[in-house]
Amino acid sequence: MKITIKNLQKKLPIHAVKIRKLIQKILKGENIRESGWINICFVNDPFIKKFNAKFHKTNSSTDVLAFNLSEKILLADIMISTDTAIRQAAIFKTSADYELSLYVAHGILHILGYNDQKTNQAKLMRKKEAQYVNR
């Protein structure tokens, strides 16, 4: 699996090795053995807001946008807002690095087919996120 990590923001340091290991742990835990390419891009709120407006018709920032670009192989783009991670870390009394790990897990789970639109689906995603991030 090819994993590309891009940092397009300056507020938080991005630990690419840690992120790559987390993604590999999730793929292994979910029994994903196929080849493919995952792009992770760390951005600020104004950047992610533009994409959220374009693709989800929502004029606000968000924590994670995940796009599965193919049904035949794993080919995905995931965008993560570091600004949101900083805000959420203060609210939940965690670290921004921990929040980023949760967002990475959340994005990967989305591209693997998990959904959080209904309460029971959201609970399963939160459980899986914690399982991979806190392990």
Image (cartoon, rainbow, N blue to C red):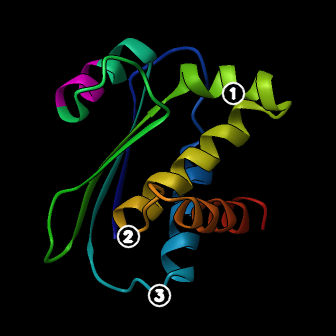
For mark 3, give the secondary structure.
Answer: loop
Marks 2 and 1, how far apart at CA: 24 Å
User: Mark 2 against mark 3, which lies toward the viewer?
Assistant: 2
> Is 82 drawn above or below residue 102 in the view shown?
above
| Magenta region includes residue 35 | no
For mark 2, give the secondary structure.
Answer: loop
Query: Which numbered disc, 2 or 1, marks the residue that appears first in the sequence?
Result: 1
Query: Which numbered disc, 3 or 1, marks the residue that appears first in the sequence?
Result: 3
Say left or right for 57 vs 60.
left
The residue beneath circle 1 is 88
Whether label 2 touches label 1, CB < 8 Å: no
Query: Which numbered disc, 2 or 3, marks the residue that appears first in the sequence?
Result: 3
Image coordinates for residue 125, horizontal then vertical, percent: 57, 63
Residue at image coords 44%, 55%: 117
Number of other residues with Cα within 10 Å of mark 3, as a class: few under 14, some 14 to 19, many 20 or more: few
- Looking at the rendering, the stretch of residues picked out in magenta corresponds to 50-54
Image coordinates for residue 32, horizontal then vertical, percent: 40, 83
Say left or right for 49 vs 101.
left
Amino acid tagged 1 = Gln
